[in-house]
Image (cartoon, rainbow, N blue to C red):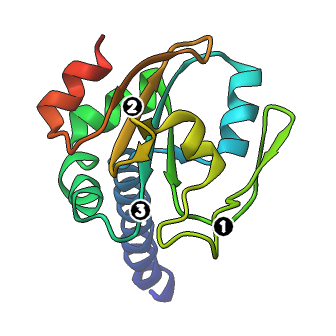
Amino acid sequence: MVQIAYKPLGLLLAISFLLSTTQLKAQQVDSVRWLSFEGLEEALATQPKKVFIDFYTDWCTYCRKMDKVVFTKPELVDLLNDQYYAVRFNAETDAPVAFGGQLFINDQVGKSRTPIHQIAQLLALRQGRFVAPTLVLLDEEFKVVSRHFEYMDSKKLLRALNY
């Protein structure tokens, strides 16, 4: 009799575990798999793929809106995760970045009210100035396909990604 009482409890616990892990997997699929530049370099060495880079700043309202509204759309998440390596990069970070055998730094820290990192200076300037958000698309050979210096809703971004 004691064994019979434990079997339903064990079955209930097993079902609860399966449901929670299935739910966890579904949550993981619903978000963009963002890489660092270091992670991007490793991924590109393994398998070439198109690259999407989101340059943002902490003070940028439109950047936060894209995080909450655009980068949560399932069709956009699926496209970025399947066809691109996606990188998010804070253009004002003071952290050094090793990429392509070079070390990139933010040499403007302490010299400018808005210090822009060298990586952002190379890829994300519009007429010599950084504008947030800046979205950069690169092909499989790491050549710039397009740059977008604006907030893009999910439909507009999907069109750009499907070039």
Task: Give the CA distance from mark 3 to mark 1.
Answer: 12 Å
When the figure is inspected, residue 158 is found, relative to residue 149, above or below; the finding is above
Specify the quadrant of the image occupied by residue 134: top left
Question: How many residues crowd mark 1 within 10 Å: few (<14), some (14–19), many (20+)?
Answer: some
Query: Depth-wise, is mark 2 or mark 3 nearer the camera?
Result: 3
- At numbered mark 1, what does the secondary structure look like: helix, strand or loop? loop
Residue visible at 37% across and 63% down in the picture:
15
Residue ID for mark 2:
80
Say whether residue 93 is left or right of residue 150. Answer: right
Specify the quadrant of the image occupied by residue 99: top right
Asked if disc 2 and disc 3 are in contact, CB closer than 8 Å, the reply is no
Question: How many residues crowd mark 3 within 10 Å: few (<14), some (14–19), many (20+)?
Answer: many
Q: Amino acid at mark 2?
A: Leu
Q: Residue furthest bottom?
A: 2
Residue 41 disc label:
none
Task: Give the CA distance from mark 2 to mark 3.
Answer: 21 Å
Mark closest to the chain's N terminus, 2 or 3: 3
Residue 61 is situated, as x and y percent measured from the top left of the image, at 23, 65
Residue ID for mark 3:
57
Task: Give the CA distance from mark 2 to mark 1.
Answer: 27 Å
The N terminus lies in which quarter of the figure?
bottom left
Specify the quadrant of the image occupied by residue 146: top left
Residue 72 is situated, as x and y percent measured from the top left of the image, at 25, 49
Mark closest to the chain's N terminus, 2 or 1: 2
Seen from the viewer's position, the closer of residues 12 and 67 is: 67
Say whether residue 107 is left or right of residue 59. Answer: right
Residue visible at 28% across and 47% down in the picture:
71
When the figure is inspected, residue 125 is found, relative to residue 68, above or below; the finding is above
Question: How many residues crowd mark 2 within 10 Å: few (<14), some (14–19), many (20+)?
Answer: many
